[in-house]
Image (cartoon, rainbow, N blue to C red):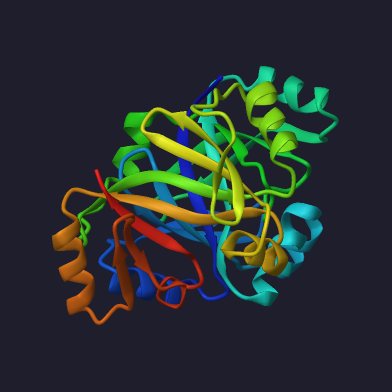
Amino acid sequence: MIERFDHAVIGVPDLESAMDAFRRLGFEVAVGGRHPSLGTRNAIVRFGLDYLELLTVEDLAVARARGPFGNELLSFLDQGSGLVGFVLAGAGLEGEVEGLRDLGLGVEGPFEMDRIHPKGGRLEWRLVLPGGSPWRKPWPYLIDWITGEDELLAWDPPGDHANLVGGVAGMDLVVEDLEEAARLYEHALGLRAGDRAYRRPGATSRRYRLGSFRLELHQPDGPGLVAAELERRGPGPYRLVLATSDLDLTTDTLSRAGVTISRSSTGLDIAPSEAVGARIRIVPV
């Protein structure tokens, strides 16, 4: 059963530069570790059990040998950087695997993986990959943590973020077919729509809730930002929404750092160029 949002993945060609960029945004960024079976390594922006992962490829040969998972990530990084995937967490996940297969979507897993922490620990989990790859897709990949929650937070404690961001509030996805995407989230993953499909400028949308996390699917129905994003990068994550305890202080912190931002009634938007290509909106709790 899907229980919560786990993390968003931001693909970056140069991990050290990406870490510097996110520190400039007021995040505490921790060195993550290596994934020996994937040829990747990462850094973590931890809030609680939810976090952001800055991910890069370290070993090209290993990544290429991993099939679509590695090759699609490499293809994305060849074109730049930004939001490339996201992860939902649950227990068991056999029902989700069966539901995805009912929809005719190939599924890899659950299979066990691990990450070697720089402090010497080993974090372990089971992973489910719909469609063979999670990168720039209208679906997440799924994780069932073997390592317990207390131990996860002991190895990677929540950061003390100068920008006062305290968690992931939501994710916006661009999809080609809203009804097809809704069947995946509702039938296969068991999420319940908070609203029927509704219109917004240039798109028809549907919203889901998973605890405090909001997931919105957007299908373009005319010219606009959603249509432009679909044409530019295809379906997949469009915008990451983060929550702050004080939007005014967050605005002041970013302004003092010289970060390019824009504020409106819907929140505070960070220019993607400041966040290694990721589109990020910050909203009050």
Identify the residue at the far bottom of this view. Answer: 258
Q: Quadrant of the N terminus?
A: top right
Q: Is residue 183 left or right of residue 44?
A: right
Within the image, what quadrant is residue 222 found in? Answer: bottom right
Residue 107 drawn above or below residue 165: above
Residue 71, position as x, y percentages in the image: 77, 62
Q: How many marks?
A: 0
Residue 177, position as x, y percentages in the image: 74, 43
Q: Quadrant of the C terminus?
A: top left
Q: Is residue 15 left or right of residue 107?
A: left
For the question of whether residue 145 can be seen, the reply is no
Q: Residue at x 29, y 74 (%)?
A: 24
For the question of whether residue 253 can be seen, the reply is yes
Residue 28 drawn above or below residue 207: below
Q: Residue at x 29, y 66 (%)?
A: 263
Q: Residue at x 65, y 71 (%)?
A: 77
Q: Nearer the viewer, residue 205 or 215?
A: 205
Identify the residue at the far right of this view. Answer: 104
Q: Nearer the viewer, residue 50 or 265?
A: 265
Residue 217 drawn above or below residue 258: above
Residue 98, position as x, y percentages in the image: 75, 20
Q: Nearer the viewer, residue 132 or 272?
A: 272
Q: Residue at x 32, y 73 (%)?
A: 261
Residue 121, position as x, y percentages in the image: 42, 44
Q: Is residue 47 left or right of residue 116?
A: left
Q: Is residue 242 left or right of residue 143?
A: left
Q: Nearer the viewer, residue 149 or 84?
A: 84
